[in-house]
Every structure is written in structure tokens, then in C-alpha cells.
Amino acid sequence: MIINKKIFSALEVEKLPESKQREIAVRLENIILDKLFVEAMGKLPSQKKKEYIKILEFGEPKDIYIFLTDNISDFEELAKKIAVEVVEKFKEELNA
């Protein structure tokens, strides 16, 4: 799971019921993964895009991670950047 205790603490959702915490975690994780998919597709050469789509369909999460780290030089930084952006936006929405 991408969402960890640090993120929950930053969002101050650890005080919510566990079911609500899970709901928020799933929602945030899906948003992060969607954005990461789009960013990865933009950074991969066309021949790697087909391979990426196959891995998404049939591979395990670790296979996807390995593929992306092998084929996108700044993948770790990209993933962190996206996670921070999504969490910040979510935090703004909570405080609105």
C-alpha cells in the first residue's frame, strides 16, 4: 500500500474510524496510481509502452515497480512528487 502512517498523520485522519481511514487510503492510492500511470506513459518510449501495458494487465505489483524503475531514470522521485501533490490537494479539500 502506498499510503502510510506518515501520510495519515499529515492529513490528521488517524483519529477517524478505521473503515473511513481505509476508504481514504484506497481513494488516495487510486488517484496516485492513475497519475503515475499517465506520467509513466509519457516518459516511456513507444516500444516500452506496449510492454508496460502488458505488465499492468498480467504482472504483479513488484513486476510493475521493477519495470518502471528499470525504464524511468527518475521513477522514485516522480512517484514521491505525485504522492506529495495528491496528498496536498486532498488536504486542501479537507480544509475547505
Image (cartoon, helix red, strand yellow):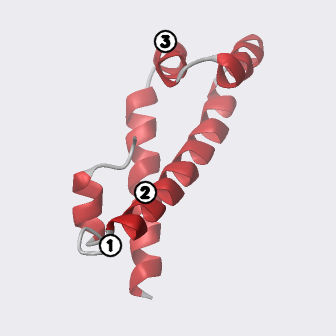
Could you say which quadrant of the image residue 22 lies in? bottom left
Amino acid type, label 3: Asp
Residue found 23% across the figure and 53% down from its top: 5
| Viewer-proximal residue among 28 and 74 | 28
Task: Read off the residue under disc 1.
Answer: 17
State the mark number for residue 80: none
Query: Do the residues bearing badges 3 and 1 touch, measured as CB atoms within 8 Å?
Result: no
Q: Quadrant of the N terminus?
A: top left
Amino acid type, label 1: Pro
Crowding near the residue tagged with mark 1, few <14, some 14–19, many ≥20 C-alpha atoms within 10 Å: few
Task: State how far apart marks 3 and 1 are (Cα).
Answer: 39 Å
Q: Earlier in the sequence, mark 2 or mark 1?
A: 1
Q: Earlier in the sequence, mark 3 or mark 1?
A: 1
Say if residue 2 shows up in the picture.
yes
Task: Read off the residue under disc 3.
Answer: 70
Please give left or right for residue 10 compared with residue 96 in the image.
left
Crowding near the residue tagged with mark 2, few <14, some 14–19, many ≥20 C-alpha atoms within 10 Å: some
| Viewer-proximal residue among 79 and 28 | 28
Closer to viewer: mark 3 or mark 1: 1
Residue found 73% across the figure and 17% down from its top: 54
The x, y position of residue 91, in whole percent, is 39, 73
The x, y position of residue 60, in whole percent, is 55, 20
Task: Read off the residue under disc 2.
Answer: 25
Helix, strand or loop for disc 1: loop
In the rendered image of this protein, does residue 95 appear above or below residue 37? below
Please give left or right for residue 20 compared with residue 36 in the image.
left
Could you say which quadrant of the image residue 52 lies in? top right
Q: Earlier in the sequence, mark 2 or mark 3?
A: 2
Residue found 42% across the figure and 80% down from its top: 94
Crowding near the residue tagged with mark 3, few <14, some 14–19, many ≥20 C-alpha atoms within 10 Å: few
